[in-house]
Image: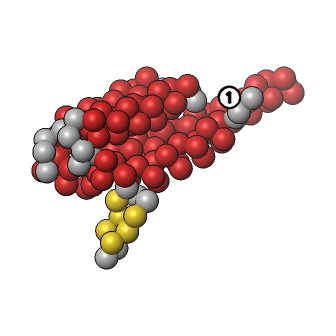
Amino acid sequence: MQNKCDGVARLKRLEHLLDRQFSIFGFRFGIDGLIGLVPIAGDLFTGAMGLYLILEARRLGARRWTVAKMLGNWAVDFTIGAVPVAGDVFDMLFKSNTKNLRLLIADLEKRAVELREVNREQMRAVAA
């Protein structure tokens, strides 16, 4: 059985591939912008990969509000990214997968802190 760290590591690799795999003159981009150049099929494929990242985030325990924000980023990227040429440039600049991964990590870190606090309070109550 995989733990959350393995899941997050897998999503980090996917995010890197989609949004930051290549660099030209310091500008980082991934296959999201390149595959998106293929009309319709490319946008559908990269949209599906972005949606997979969100579904995995939910499986890893992301809160509903975090998932909603991730879906908003994905929808903006998918909708504007479908516009020929300008959408492809937008895909390379917006990096919704990077934004979504950061939202997920922040959410999971916040939940870990909250869980530690609850555990400490329970230990104090047991000791008293």
Q: Above or below — where is 40 with respect to 68?
A: below
Colour pattern of the rendering:
secondary structure
* Residue nearest the viewer, comparing 32 with 109: 32
| SS of the residue under disc 1 | helix
Q: Which residue is mark 1?
A: 118
Q: Residue at x 13, y 41 (%)?
A: 83
Image coordinates for residue 24, horizontal then vertical, percent: 33, 72
Tell which residue pokes out farthest to the right in this image. Answer: 127
- Please report the residue visible at 30 percent of the width from the left and 53 percent of the height from the top: 34
Of residues 65 and 1, the one nearer the viewer is 1
* Above or below: residue 31 compared with residue 26: above
Q: Is residue 69 visible?
A: no
Image quadrant occupied by the C terminus:
top right
Seen at 55% across and 25% down, the residue is 59
In the picture shown, does residue 60 fall above or below 34? above
Question: Closer to the camera, 60 or 31?
Answer: 31
- In the image, residue 93 lies at what x, y percent? 25, 55
Query: Residue placed at 43% from the left, 59% from the top?
Result: 21
**Can you see residue 85?**
yes
- Asked if residue 19 lies left or right of residue 110, the reply is left
Residue toward you, 120 or 3: 3
Give amino acid for label 1: Val
- In the figure, is residue 3 to the left or right of 126? left
Horizontal side of 79 relative to 117 (left or right) equals left
How far across and how far down the image is residue 100, in percent?
Answer: 40, 41
Quadrant hosting residue 81: top left
Identify the image quadrant of the N terminus. top right
Label 1: how many residues lie within 10 Å, few (<14), some (14-19) or many (20+)?
few
Residue 110 rendering spot, x and y as whole percentages? 55, 39
